[in-house]
Image: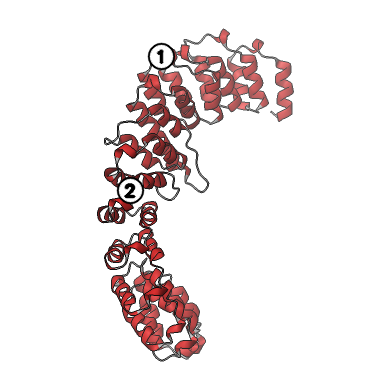
């Protein structure tokens, strides 16, 4: 069968998205056995180089007119994937003016190819060095965590060309621990500002690495660290792992837990972030501070309100068990918040665990009727220690009607004294909502 009946370009491009080993086998098979004139060679060569199949591209190019190809892209991809053979062959076989060697150097400095150092060394020894931007090359190596490349650049090139503090920040923000460690251990101390690096990492939306913070704190001058400022900045950017490390850090003992708790309570989800891990991290941090701090010196009310919003029963338990109960109150405002946010666990826990004297039972009944929590309504009404005369069942019924809580309206009519209700209003509100 003639290969002309096949769409070889599409076949190659689709094969590139299979498992790497399978892709390589398919692409190699097509190039070995099919007529290259049936392909858009410029497009497919760029594509296979992009996916790292540079050795296949090199074989295919040997019988082609090189000037008809995108040689800048091919050379850049060869450098990115650490293919020294292709780099050397291209340089020898084509017009060198068709390459962008400045970009090629940037590419090799972010390469994770097995032979990327060999390519880097060859470029440095064979290309006019004046065209390179070595400052950006070092930044690239740090940003991509290429420790061996960073090491080679620092040892073999003019270190005065680098803004090494900027390079350090690139490595920190990208979470490359080994690269950060190498820089700290090998770059002269006066060239690095570790307190500034800590401030930058804590204020970064890119990095939430406690390990990076640990490395920086370990080597920084502790007298220059403002731990409370770091916690505040990390909270602002939802870096909960970093905050946890700072609070637990035994090398620093100057934490203002009042400020720390307020910072944690102010954590809000940034656009594009996954809510679940951030809120779980926030909850864990509140609990951690409650376990470490003197509760008489921190914002307990704020913690209770936040717990009511997010149904943090363990936070409420920790507070209840460790403060004087006379200062603990589930008032109307807190009950309203718990109901508004659907924190039924907090309401259930309140009825189970704390003294009824600490709960605004009337507000709880009214809000539960309005929000349709039939089980809470039943628990409050049937609780043997609750005096029905202290419940404003007229308002509770009106709220149930207003919000079309038919199940609760029916239950109240069947189980409570109907004389307490404004039946005229019940009828009017029920008609409004179709109840």
Tag 2 residue? 212
Look at the numbered disc 2 and give the secondary structure of its residue.
helix
Residue, x 42% and y 74% (percent of image)? Answer: 131
Q: Residues within 10 Å of mark 1 (few under 14, many from 20)?
A: some
Q: How is the image coloured?
A: secondary structure
- Separation (CA) of disc 2 from disc 1: 41 Å
Q: Is residue 375 left or right of residue 135?
A: right
Residue 176: quarter of image: bottom left
Is residue 23 visible in the rendered structure shown here? no
Q: How many marks?
A: 2
Residue located beneath label 1 in the image: 325
* Element type at mark 1: helix
Residue in front for this viewpoint, 301 or 358? 301
Residue 23 numbered tag: none
Q: Position of residue 231 (x, y in %)?
A: 40, 37
Camera-side residue of 273 and 336: 273
- On the image, the x and y values in percent for residue 67 come to 47, 87
């Amino acid at each position: 069968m003639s290969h002309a009946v096949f769409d070889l370009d599409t076949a190659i491009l689709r094969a590139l998205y299979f498992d790497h080993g399978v892709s390589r086998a398919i692409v190699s098979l097509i190039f070995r056995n099919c007529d290259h004139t049936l392909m858009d060679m410029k497009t497919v060569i760029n594509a296979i180089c992009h996916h790292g199949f540079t050795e296949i591209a090199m074989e295919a190019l040997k019988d082609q007119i090189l000037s008809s190809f995108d040689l800048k892209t091919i050379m850049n991809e060869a450098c990115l994937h650490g293919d020294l053979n292709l780099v050397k062959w291209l340089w020898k076989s084509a017009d060198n003016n068709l390459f962008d060697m400045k970009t090629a150097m940037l590419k090799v400095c972010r390469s994770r190819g097995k032979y990327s150092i060999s390519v880097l060394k060859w470029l440095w020894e064979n290309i006019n060095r004046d065209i390179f931007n070595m400052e950006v090359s070092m930044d690239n190596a740090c940003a991509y965590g290429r420790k061996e490349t960073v090491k080679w650049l620092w040892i073999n090139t003019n270190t005065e060309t680098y803004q090494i503090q900027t390079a350090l920040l690139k490595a920190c923000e990208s979470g490359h621990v080994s690269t950060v460690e190498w820089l700290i251990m090998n770059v002269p101390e006066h060239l690095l500002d570790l307190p500034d690096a800590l401030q930058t990492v804590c204020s970064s939306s890119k990095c939430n690495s406690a390990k990076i913070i640990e490395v920086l704190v370990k080597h920084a001058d502790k007298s220059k660290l403002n731990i409370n400022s770091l916690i505040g900045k990390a909270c602002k950017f939802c870096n909960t792992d970093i905050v946890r490390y700072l609070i637990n850090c035994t090398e620093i003992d100057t934490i203002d837990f009042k400020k720390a708790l307020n910072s944690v309570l102010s954590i809000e989800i940034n656009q594009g972030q996954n809510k679940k891990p951030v809120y779980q991290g926030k909850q864990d941090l509140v609990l951690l501070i409650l376990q470490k701090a003197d509760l008489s010196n921190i914002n307990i009310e704020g913690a209770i309100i936040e717990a009511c919003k997010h149904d943090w029963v363990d936070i409420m338990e920790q507070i209840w068990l460790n403060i004087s109960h006379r200062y603990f109150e589930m008032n109307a405002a807190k009950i309203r918040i718990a109901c508004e946010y659907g924190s039924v666990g907090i309401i259930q826990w309140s009825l189970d665990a704390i003294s009824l004297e600490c709960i605004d039972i009337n507000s709880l009944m009214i809000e539960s009727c309005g929000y349709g929590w039939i089980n809470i309504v039943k628990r409050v009404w049937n609780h043997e220690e609750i005096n029905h005369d202290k419940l404003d069942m007229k308002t509770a019924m009106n709220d149930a009607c207003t919000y079309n809580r038919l199940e609760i309206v029916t239950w109240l009519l069947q189980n409570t004294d109907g004389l307490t209700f404004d039946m005229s209003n019940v009828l009017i509100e029920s008609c409004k909502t179709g109840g």
